Amino acid sequence: MADEARGMAVALLDAVLGERRLLSQAVGELPSAGPAERARAQRLALTALRHLDPADRLLSPHLRKAPPLTVRNILRLAVVEMAVEGAAPHGVVNAAVDLARRGRRTQHLAGLVNAVLRKLAPASLAGLPAQRMPMWLRQPLVRRWGRGVVAAIEAVQAAAPPLDLTAKPGRIAPGEPLPTGSFRLREPGQVSALPGFEAGDWWVQDAAAALAVRLLDPQPGERIADLCAAPGGKTLQLAAAGAEVTALDLSEPRLVRLRENLARTGLQAEVVAADLLAWEGGPFDAVLLDAPCSATGTIRRHPDLPFVKDGSELPALVALQSAMLDRALGMLKPGGRLVFCTCSLLEEEGEAQLSALLERHPALRVEPPSLAGIEPGWVGPEGGLRLRPDHWAEAGGMDGFYMVRVRKP
């Protein structure tokens, strides 16, 4: 019999690929199930999304016409289980056939599922290209960095990412130390069971994201605003450095996790749920603005994004980032510093945003980064830090980010 997790995984794929809904939204609407089954369903769906193109290339010669989406997703999931996860073909095929039989709209295609998968078992994706980014994203990246770099980014995005941790000053976290000061675990298991979790010695934070606070260089006693703060990794870094932190975010539900992490780590920050464009605060010694963006640098962690977004939201996001930047500058004391960052691979949300900011505020001074562990090629001629998923590719890569520090006159 098909287990519950496989059925939920197919439902998640239907939601992402058919309804263009984010996986995080669809997971919350899964039927009641145990935590282990829900986690397995999400892991299976994520793995399938990371390998959808190769799986389709393998299936295509055996399908005279495209079956309904749910049947395609049953086939895709089975191929990925065999080819990527190394599951026993006999059990995978039987489970896929049973899944098709249980659906009122798919039961008549159970024979097709059986025939196709028995021809493919055991499946292999060897030699097939990695999952490609959508053309609206891929084309500008190819123009900027070339096909070789983009292929390297896609190869990193096709693999499940490692888990990065940031430790409090003077503490260490489990895993391998990284050149920039983070710690990395390739196979972390249950996060809450890791040593130091209950003691609050560290928190989960991608190594690239952790560089934004290091670029800001917070000092003890400084008043610092963390704008768009949830889920809170940067707030924790600032508080651990001894700053007086105001953490602001529009979403009260997203701030719940931030408050939980503050409590677990024993760190202090003022937490405010408000709209940055309407909130009155400051003046601050320093401001960190991790602005809403396309999130195209986080596909390695969120492989559903390319199937849900089409780039049409980009102009509105760029306009919002500009308005937030101007607002953040108004909160700074004279001589104060601002770090602007986005988890985006797109120039519009990084280098071009900085150029526009300097046109509006020509007295601002860009302060290029001088940080442990970063490579010279990561710093652009304008003085910003451009991080790509293929950096440290052999060690698991990193999220894509753009970040820059400017100082107010």
Image: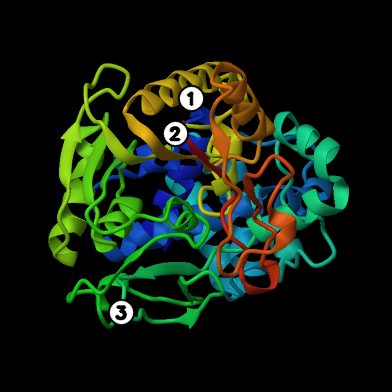
Q: Residue at x 85, y 64 (%)?
A: 127
Task: Say which amino acid is labelled 2.
Answer: Ala
Query: How far apart, in angstroms, are the residues tagged by discs 1 and 2?
Result: 6 Å
Q: Which mark is residue 170?
A: 3
Q: Which residue is mark 1?
A: 321
First reached walking from the N terminus: tag 1 or tag 3: 3
First reached walking from the N terminus: tag 3 or tag 2: 3
Q: Nearer the viewer, residue 315 or 60?
A: 315
Q: Position of residue 28 (x, y in %)?
A: 29, 42
Element class at badge 2:
loop
Q: Position of residue 167 (x, y in %)?
A: 34, 72
Element class at badge 1:
helix
Task: Say which amino acid is labelled 1.
Answer: Gln
Callout 1 crowding tier (Cα within 10 Å): few <14, some 14–19, many ≥20: many
Q: Residue at x 68, y 51 (%)?
A: 379
The nearer-to-camera label among 1 and 3 is: 3
The nearer-to-camera label among 3 and 2 is: 3
Q: Nearer the viewer, residue 1 or 262?
A: 262
First reached walking from the N terminus: tag 1 or tag 2: 2
Q: Residue at x 29, y 40 (%)?
A: 225
Q: Residue at x 31, y 28 (%)?
A: 331
